[in-house]
Amino acid sequence: MATVRVPLHLEWSTPDRTARLSDRHERGRFYEIVLREGGPTDILTYIDGALLVDLWPDIVVPKDIRNAWAPVVEARA
């Protein structure tokens, strides 16, 4: 997996931030950011469905986001 530069529109408070997607913890934090701050293009670009299913029990996202994604993620688990 790659290291990605977190786009400014997703993480404006930490310019030039990167995430090592091969590191489960960093990937989880990055997925949290994308799910909270990203739009459809960001989700299609950065989120891998199988990896999201794996991370689902451990990531922290607002209740409305968790409720929206839960049916899809839990159906794949």
Image (tube, rainbow, N blue to C red):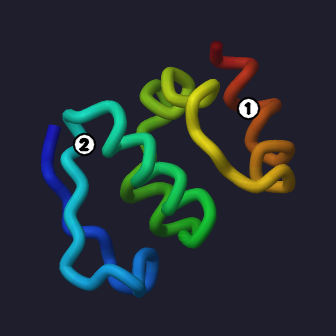
Query: 32 and 74: which one is in front?
Result: 32
Determine the CA span between mark 1 and mark 2: 22 Å
Q: Where is residue 39 in the image (x, y as percent from the top left)?
A: 58, 71
Would residue 17 be found to the left or right of residue 45 on screen? left
Q: In which quarter of the image is residue 40?
A: bottom right
In the shown orientation, is residue 7 left or right of residue 10?
A: left
Q: What's the residue at 38%, 54% (across, down)?
A: 46
Q: Mark 1 sits on what residue?
A: 72
Instruction: Give the numbered dot on residue 21.
Output: 2
Q: For residue 19, which numbered disc appears in the image?
A: none
Between 1 and 40, which is closer to the camera in this rendering?
A: 1
Identified at 26% across, 84% down, the residue is 15
Across and down, in percent, residue 21 comes to 25, 42
Marks counted in the figure total: 2
Tags 1 and 2 touching, CB below 8 Å:
no
Mark 2 element type = loop
Residue type at mark 1 is: Val
Identify residue type, mark 2: Leu
* Quarter of the figure that contains the N terminus: top left
Question: Can you say whether 9 is above or below 42 in the image?
Answer: below
